[in-house]
């Protein structure tokens, strides 16, 4: 484990960058890498923790041996509850504890390097602008975005109030760069309106017009192509796209 011992962010921007890397790693573990994460959390093993690192890599491991540890520790024993509840509820529980751990690590750095009241407030505001891991994992963030988008579209143009019906005739993927005739027809502007507040189901970051996105036909979540390893060329030949989470879903007794 790197544990952050050799990496000490000292400014608000550096701490926030550290936070985003760890957050992306844990979201990946609980969504796109959910199958592997589930396997590693064997209830027969000892107390296990989910660690997220600034490099956007995650790890399931035993807690640090030193007391006190270099950094605050994640919740212990996440594996013990794995088979005692439905998988979605278990993932939600781990997500909540992961959110708490991320905040504790960020403000640990803030305290260690003497952030004043203004810096702490700025750091919190930057963190609070992102959906929580819990919101991403449970789909609450996507729902909030849809509701906000629906209200915005209704107030600006009543004909756009039913964006889902209109999107059914659109491709399941969004091109990174629109053709010139599409720009002239205003289609690119409409695409930006429709997806501007959409969040990636894998990393939780916002839609950007210069990035390739694809929508899962099962859960209807949008994903960065790079997060689910789908290229525009490959998307052209996919009749029904299933995201990693939907592909890995298994029947539970």
Image (cartoon, rainbow, N blue to C red):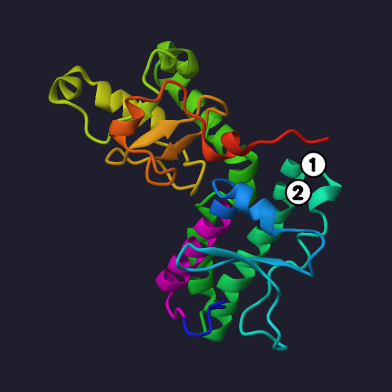
Task: Indicate the quadrant containing the N terminus: top left, top right, bottom left or bottom right.
Answer: bottom right
Among the 4 quarters of the image, the one containing residue 109? bottom right
**Which is the main secondary structure of the residues drawn in magenta?**
helix
Find numbered disc 2 in the image and state the secondary structure of the residue it sits on: helix
Q: Residues within 10 Å of mark 2 (few under 14, many from 20)?
A: some
Q: Position of residue 199 (x, y in %)?
A: 47, 40
* Drawn side of residue 60 relative to residue 153, left or right: right
Q: Position of residue 80 (x, y in %)?
A: 82, 59
For the point 48% across and 49% down, which residue is it?
Answer: 203
* Drawn side of residue 36 relative to residue 14, left or right: right
* Drawn side of residue 209 relative to residue 98, left or right: left
Residue 187 visible here: yes
Q: Nearer the viewer, residue 116 or 211?
A: 211
**Magenta part of the chain:** 8-27
Task: Indicate the quadrant containing the C terminus: top left, top right, bottom left or bottom right.
Answer: top right
Find numbered disc 1 in the image and state the secondary structure of the residue it sits on: loop
Q: Position of residue 234 (x, y in %)?
A: 33, 32
> In the figure, 168 relative to 214: above or below?
above
Q: Position of residue 57 (x, y in %)?
A: 50, 63
- The residue identified by callout 2 is 90
* Marks 2,1: beta carbons within 8 A: yes
For the point 64% across and 54% down, which residue is it?
Answer: 37
Residue 86, numbered circle: 1
Residue 95 visible here: no
* Drawn side of residue 170 relative to residue 137, left or right: left
């Amino acid at each position: 484990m790197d544990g952050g011992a050799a990496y000490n962010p000292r400014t608000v921007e550096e701490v926030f960058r550290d936070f985003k890397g760890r957050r992306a790693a844990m979201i990946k573990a609980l969504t796109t890498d959910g199958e592997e994460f589930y396997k590693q959390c064997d209830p027969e093993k000892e107390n296990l923790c989910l660690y997220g690192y600034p490099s956007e890599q995650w790890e399931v491991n035993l807690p640090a041996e030193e007391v006190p540890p270099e950094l605050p520790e994640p919740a212990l024993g996440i594996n013990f509850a794995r088979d005692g509840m439905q998988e979605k509820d278990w993932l939600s529980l781990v997500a909540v504890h992961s959110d708490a751990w991320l905040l504790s690590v960020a403000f640990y750095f803030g305290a260690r390097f003497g952030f004043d009241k203004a810096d702490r407030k700025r750091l919190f505001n930057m963190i609070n602008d992102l959906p929580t891991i819990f919101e991403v994992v449970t789909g609450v963030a996507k729902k909030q975005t849809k509701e906000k988008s629906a209200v915005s579209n209704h107030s600006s143009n009543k004909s756009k109030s039913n964006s889902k019906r209109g999107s059914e005739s659109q491709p399941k993927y969004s091109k990174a760069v629109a053709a010139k005739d599409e720009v002239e027809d205003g289609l690119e502007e409409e695409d930006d309106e429709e997806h501007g507040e959409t969040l990636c189901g894998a990393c939780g970051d916002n839609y950007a017009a210069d990035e390739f996105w694809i929508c899962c036909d099962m859960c209807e979540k949008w994903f960065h192509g790079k997060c689910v390893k789908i290229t525009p060329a490959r998307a052209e030949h996919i009749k029904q796209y299933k995201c990693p989470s939907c592909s890995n879903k298994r029947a539970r007794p």
